[in-house]
Structures are given as C-alpha cells and as structure tokens.
Amino acid sequence: MKRIYNFSAGPAVLPEDVLREAADEMLDYQGCGMSVMEMSHRSKEFESIIGEAEQDLRDLLSIPDNYKVLFLQGGAHLQFAMLPLNLMKNGVADYIITGHWAKRAFTEAKKYLKANAVASSEDKTFSYIPDCSDLPISEDADYVYICENNTIYGTKFHTLPNTKGKTLVADVSSCFLSEPMDVSKYGVIYSGAQKNIGPAGVVVVIIREDLIPDEVAPTVPTMLQFKTHADNKSLFNTPPAYGIYICGKVFKWLKKQGGLEAMQKRNEQKAAILYNYLDSSRLFHGTVEKASRSLMNVPFVTGDADLDAKFIKEATAAGFANLKGHRSVGGMRASIYNAMPVEGVQALVDFMKKFEAENS
C-alpha cells in the first residue's frame, strides 16, 4: 500500500504509527473484546483512556494545576459562542481580526456582547499580523481574542498581543502542539482536533479555573456552560470517545518524538525547505509577509489562475493531495502539520522545481 502525501488543512494527516496502532486495536482494545467505538464512556477502560490523554497533554504543555482540560464537541464554531456566553461580566470583548476564523468569531460574539475590533490586517488581505504592542484595549474588556495561527492565510502571532492585563483567549487550532507554549499567558486556549491532533469531532479547551463561572445567564443552555463539562470531567454526556482515543495516541506519539521542543525543530526544518524554495523561485511565490509566516500553513501562487489549476491537477496525479487553496482565496496551500514527514515536504519542493522547469 502506498500512502499519498496529504497536505490538507483539516481533516489532516495523522501519524502512521497512530493509525497502525488504532487498526490493531480496532476489533479488540487491549483484551476487552470490543472496539473503543463500541465502549461505554462510563467504563473503566474509557475512563483510563480519557484520563491518560489529559495527563499526557498536561505533560506536553506543562499545564498549570489551576487550568482545566476539557474534551468537547462542536469544534471552533461552538467556542465562538461559548466564550462570550461564559466569560462576559461587563459585556465587552476586544477582537484582533487576522483572518476568516477570527472574523467569524467576532461576528458571533456580537450577538451576545459588545465586541470591538481593536486591530485588523484585512487591509492587505490578512497577509500579515498587525502590531499589537499598544492596542486600544477597552478598560472594561472581559477578554481579548486572537486566532493565533490563521489556517487560510498562513500567518502566525510570533509575539502575543499586549492585552494590558486583560484575559487573553486564543484559537490555536492549526498550531496546537507544534511548538512549546506558555499556557499561563492565556486565560483560555482551544483547538479543533482535526488539524494537528486527531480526527474531526473533538475540540480541546484549556481554561483557567477562575474563568469558569458558577452562574451564567439563565438562557445559556446547559451544554454551553464550561462548568457543566468541568464538573463532569468532560463526561456530562456521551463524548466523542473514539476521537479522544486517537488524540490520546497522538499525545503519546508526540512524547516519543521528544516532546514539543523536538517538534518545533522538525517543523522549522520543514517550513524552511518550502519557504526557501518559494523565496528563490521565479514561478511560485508566497503570499505572507516574512515576519508573519506560519510554520503550519504555507499559501503560495503562480500569479496565473490557469497555471495554478494546472499545478494542482498535476500535483494531485503525482501523489500530493489537497494542495488547493481555500475557496475564499484560491491559489495553493501546503499544510505541513506535525505528522507530515520532512520527506513529504522535500518531495513537494522537488515536484515544484520540476513543474517550474517545464512551465517557465
């Protein structure tokens, strides 16, 4: 069996070791006679699975004891609503708009509170991260919101914004576990699993305990209250059990790779291979300002839509899948998450060189 190189932004490539382990355990998980897919979420076996997953994640990120780890459903989109519904005290929040998903979060938040856009990079098609060293942060802001890595546009906050003492909330879906991070600098971190840690259907939320309100507005549904899930250790209702199981295996895989410091070095190596070629190519060029480049998502174009389409078609036929850019921006995008091997990125660059030679 020959596996292709999958450059999808999500659902995305998973480590082969994880997939093989899951395949071996598909019919019988560690001698219990059933698949994790069939297992009660109240069983001792699943309690062990979710407990180990949480502990491994805590180990990887050195998560402080005063933060809760929640395995929820609904993806990032549900967090767009859960965050304002749970965090608002003064009914004000500041948003930094650096792409499609930050803009969606901002639009959703406006349904529940006064949301202010305190910075934006939309003026240059979200091709950079704005200077966030001295923003007009609202004195009564309940939190400041960022999308730390912008999957569609390929930008990344390399320096966190100065929130002037206000709680920082971050969507880290497409950069989660790609490098070390200081959890204590955030009030809430959340990540959809389908980009860098597992299959679609799970969202990991890391939230400081003092931000989990004992009471929210009576109209807030029970399932949309962080306290519901924190009090029940993510088992208030049937969780996305199989997805959590795969996430747990990815956490163990990351530990075996040497942890997040080792992953950062590998990711920097992969990104350098691709960016160095883009910077020297006469045909292809990147679309992001160098200081704002993401290690995970690399958009690029030829400048000719027909040539872009030809490249995507030929690349797909050659075994490089899902290189088409997001429908809102076009062009190409290579998502090179943790599980993408260095060999995959080098093979892509070799193919791009060949294509350039044939089409210049």
Image: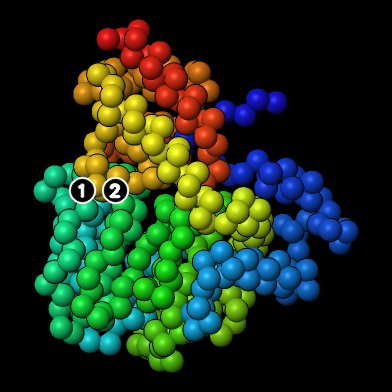
User: In the rendered view of the protein, which quadrant contains the N terminus?
Assistant: top right
* Residue name at image x 21 percent, y 48 percent: 128
Mark number for residue 265? Answer: none
Q: Earlier in the sequence, mark 2 or mark 1?
A: 1
Q: Which residue is mark 1?
A: 128
Q: Secondary structure at mark 2?
A: strand
Q: Which residue is mark 2?
A: 155
Give the residue type that dot 1 points to: Tyr
Q: Quadrant of residue 181?
A: bottom left
**Residue found farthest to the top:** 358
- Residue 261 horizontal/vertical position (percent): 51, 55
- Residue 4 horizontal/vertical position (percent): 57, 28
Q: Is residue 19 left or right of residue 322?
A: right
Nearer-the-camera pick, 242 or 315: 315
**Residue found farthest to the bottom:** 214
Mark 1 neighbour density, 10 Å: few (under 14) some (14–19) many (20 or more): many
Residue 80, relative to residue 325: is it above or below?
below
- Residue 148 horizontal/vertical position (percent): 33, 58
Q: Is residue 9 visible?
A: no
Nearer-the-camera pick, 360 or 263: 263
Give the residue type that dot 2 points to: Thr
Residue 51, relative to residue 247: is it above or below?
below
Look at the numbered discs 2 and 1 and tell me whether their residues touch, using CB distance below 8 Å. Answer: yes
Q: Quadrant of residue 117?
A: bottom left
Q: Quadrant of residue 277?
A: top left
Q: Secondary structure at mark 1?
A: loop
Q: Is residue 172 left or right of residue 110?
A: right
